[in-house]
Image (tube, rainbow, N blue to C red):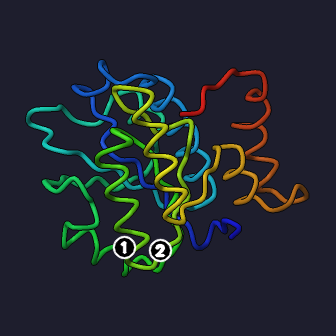
Amino acid sequence: MRLKREASLLLIVDLQAGLLPVIDGGDQAVSEAGWLGGVAEALDVPVWLTEQYPAGLGGTAPGLLDALGEHRRWEKVHFNAHAETEFARALVESGRHQVVLCGAEAHICVLQTGLALLEAGYEVAWLAEATASRRHEEAALARRRMAQAGALMVSADMVAYEWLERCDDAAFKDVHRRFLKGRSARPLRFF
């Protein structure tokens, strides 16, 4: 499966201010999700955020919100975002069948959401450097489980270049100037 921008949606799960201080790699997850969110906005790919019990865990991390332009925010009580009726209905109505998935915690809310999306017939791409848990080992285990279930393991660069498809148009020139040009030297840890 190749990712197509007209078929894709970026779903960022529960990167919330009250949870991130205990997440191994939380800062990188926020940075990478925000970076890909900026690329998504430039290419008209919808960006959705979820928040699990924001009264207790706080809202989405301010740094992530600062990096994003237009997005849709969903509060949820289920660990699996797709179990929320309005979310599932809106996803169908969006017409998007590829979900690029990231967030926290990898082995709980992100995993359960990803498995449910696969069960519902969506193609799921697991954004490895932006999906984290309190313990690195649990994030790695969740990634392996998602791969076994049929999700693709991807990096933000893979997604961006697949969405772009070519280098000879205005979209590439804009995204390259704003997002890609200064990115290659940054060290990343893949969870």
* Residue visible at 29% across and 36% down in the picture: 60
**Residue 80 in the image, given as x and y percentages of width and height:** 26, 58
Using the image as rendered, state which of residue 120 and residue 94 is in the foreground. 120
Q: Quadrant of residue 132?
A: top left
Specify the farthest residue to the right. 168
Per the image, the residue denoted by label 2 is 122
Quarter of the image containing the N terminus?
A: bottom right
| Amino acid type at mark 2 | Tyr
In this figure, what is the number of numbered marks? 2
* Residue visible at 32% across and 25% down in the picture: 20
**Residue 175 in the image, given as x and y percentages of width and height:** 72, 46
* Residue visible at 58% across and 73% down in the picture: 7
Per the image, the residue denoted by label 1 is 91
Q: Quadrant of residue 43?
A: bottom right
| Amino acid type at mark 1 | Leu
How dense is the environment of label 1, judged by Cα within 10 Å: few (below 14), some, or many (20 and up)?
Answer: some
How dense is the environment of label 2, judged by Cα within 10 Å: few (below 14), some, or many (20 and up)?
Answer: some
Q: Is residue 51 left or right of residue 67?
A: left
Q: Which mark is residue 77?
A: none
**Residue 77 in the image, given as x and y percentages of width and height:** 13, 54
* Residue visible at 39% across and 35% down in the picture: 138
Q: Quadrant of residue 170?
A: bottom right
Marks 1 and 2 close (CB-CB < 8 Å): yes
Q: Is residue 153 left or right of residue 131?
A: right
Tag 2 or tag 1, which sits nearer the N-term? 1
Using the image as rendered, state which of residue 167 and residue 14 is in the foreground. 14
Q: In 3D space, how far apart are the residues under numbered discs 1 and 2 (Cα atoms)?
A: 10 Å
Of badges 1 and 2, the one in the foreground is 2
**Tag 2, which secondary structure?**
loop
**Tag 1, which secondary structure?**
helix
